[in-house]
Amino acid sequence: MTPLPASAPVDGGPGTVPVSRVPLGPRFVARSGRPQGWSPAHRVLGPELDDTLHRVADERGTDRRAVAAVLLLDRYALRLAAPVLAAFHELDVLLDARPEVVSLGPDPHAPGWLALAAPGRPARGDRAALRASLLDGALLPLAEELAVRTRAGRRTLRAAVAHAVALSTLHLSWRRPRPDALVGQTRALLHDAGLAGLVVVGAVRVDGTDWMSVRRRACCLAFRTTSAAGRYCGACPVRPAAAVESDLADAARSFRARAAPDPLPTAPDPLSNPLSNPPGSTP
């Protein structure tokens, strides 16, 4: 695939959508405007959806359109939800996530693959407006279209959306003084959108501190592919719940260690993401 131009910022800065006062890592990067040569999301995920599904199926190694549908939605939902949720929770800004104002770059594996043309507006903590933009206006209609087009299970598709919301918020929550600070808000957003119960959102106790935790209740179906990418993600419901919790605890300790002040003065580096991209789910 063609890489992004060298001028594309990797972690915030000019040409990207402001989502925080500090760099949050590549998963939260979204370009601003309508970059030349990029494809409108409403076209890629609308009239060209069959071609898009074919490319995903070929890339991931599956001949099942339903599997390709879930993997496509999983990728798109994670890449769209992260900057939108960051802007909402970090800056109290509501970004327009509708496909009519979203463009997609040539390389879905690159940071900044997605661009938002419409400027944000003050969110004022309006959870209903966030749901209307990100879920009702973007991800849930796509889930329904994929269900109709490919006969993929609606529960599985909607669970991919729920997981994207929960995992993106986990990465934001872990950066707070209370690493479980966004558990309640995440549960409320998912409940309001009719997605409650499709993903487990809670907290894991690590050395006396509660850290937000996420576990899928429906599989992304990556295990049905033949690609070299991981076939089981860290939050996979096929794995024992105790194993998922143990991995989360290890990730929390690692994140805490990286976040600790360096005893020697060094140039500031943005914290890396607390959890790696779930194999089989993300670019």
Image: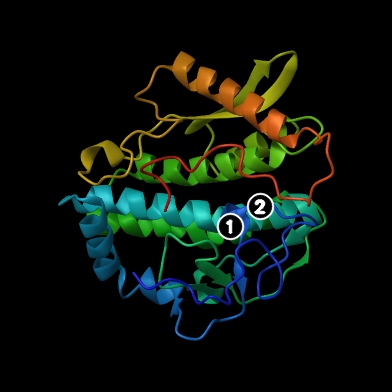
Kindly give the residue lying farthest to the front in the view shown.
264
| Figure disc tally | 2
Residue placed under numbered mark 1 in the picture: 134
Residue occupying image coordinates x 64% and y 23%: 203
Q: Quadrant of residue 101?
A: bottom right
Q: Quadrant of residue 156?
A: top left
Q: Position of residue 45 (x, y in %)?
A: 38, 68
Residue occupying image coordinates x 69% and y 35%: 258
Q: Position of residue 82 (x, y in %)?
A: 60, 53
Towards the viewer: 107 or 120: 107
Q: Amino acid at mark 2?
A: Leu
| Colour convention of the picture | rainbow
Q: Is residue 151 visible?
A: no
Give the spatial CA distance, label 2 vs label 1.
9 Å
Q: Are marks 2 and 1 in contact (CB under 8 Å)?
A: yes
Pick the quarter of the image with the N terminus.
bottom left
Residue occupying image coordinates x 57% and y 45%: 165
Q: Is residue 55 visible?
A: yes
Residue placed under numbered mark 2 in the picture: 85
Towards the viewer: 63 or 207: 207
Left or right position of 213 against 160: right
Residue occupying image coordinates x 28% and y 59%: 56
**Label 1 crowd (10 A; few <14 / some 14-19 / many >=20):** many
Q: Amino acid at mark 1?
A: Leu
Secondary structure, mark 2, is helix
Towards the viewer: 245 or 74: 245
Left or right position of 283 against 197: left
Towards the viewer: 100 or 258: 258
